[in-house]
Amino acid sequence: MAHIASLHVYPVKSCRGIDLQRARVTATGLEWDRRWMIVDGAGRFVTQRENPRLAAIATAVGGRLRLTADGLPALSVDPEHGGPERPVRIWSDTVTGVDAGEEAADWLLAALGAPLHLVRIVTSKLRDADPEYSGPGRHPVTFTDGYPILMISRASLEDLNRRLPSPLPMNRFRPNIVIEGVPAHAEDARTEFRFGAVTLRGVKHCTRCSITTTDQETCARDADQEPLRTLKTYRYNRALKGAVFGQNCVIAAGVGEELLAGAELMIA
């Protein structure tokens, strides 16, 4: 039986994720996912592409956002923190972020060795997923690269690992939903994925970047550029100009519902 194998959110873009047994579906994806982002002095987003040490910052959410890194006291931030609004840049989009202030900036300087700022999304000023792929209707997103949810199957990773010199864990690919009980790359289908009252629609294959070459425990880059090197031999998409792995999804139904690990999956 096809079902959800695991659920994951990444409260701060490019920092370590959180594994969940259940997650509430919001209009922008799983609750808490990419609600915060780290930006440089010009307001440009910073990810593991530029600073692999972001992988070492662990996150937790609840009454507060909590960031931890080796050798530093934890940073605790009110999830609705105030602060000055500022324009921030993510890819070609300019959106509004709320700066978490100097305490957060000082903590990031100590953790990452660069003058950076933590900003929170303004939920009343969200950008939308690319309508060329997402289709009709509005599909708002937080600080994700472009779409509300990323889905990958365990079989896809197993297929990749059979081709690699050394197997890799799923966290290299930073999915929100991992499914199992389906063939490799079943998630490639641009169709509906139904989990009870929640329906997701696959809209665009995920083009992979250098983050996949970064060990999420040690922050080290793979010297041979794996798994990108291998992915390009059998998963290169000419139209998207890159190796693809995983499916970006929008929410067709189920905002306000919960997804549960183990929930049955139906592919329409």
Image: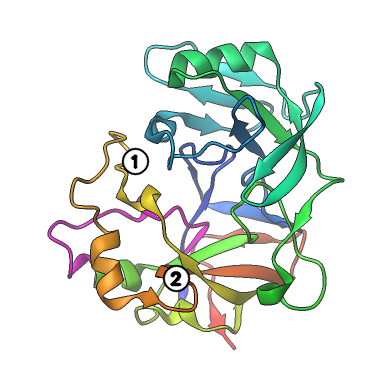
Q: Which quadrant of the figure has residue 131?
A: bottom right
**Residue sitting at x 31%, y 35%:** 219
**Residue sitting at x 27%, y 59%:** 227
Looking at the image, which is closer to me, 49 or 143? 49
User: Where does the image place residue 3, in percent across and percent down from the top left?
Assistant: 48, 72
What's the coloring here?
rainbow
* Residue 162 lies in the magenta-colored region: yes
Rendered image: mark on residue 216: 1
Q: Amino acid at mark 2?
A: Lys
Q: Which residues are magenta?
A: 161-178
User: Where does the image place residue 104, in percent across and percent down from the top left?
Assistant: 62, 17
User: Where does the image place residue 84, in percent across and percent down from the top left?
Assistant: 82, 22
* SS class, disc 2: loop
Looking at the image, which is closer to me, 133 or 154? 133
* SS class, disc 1: loop
**Residue sitting at x 65%, y 46%:** 143
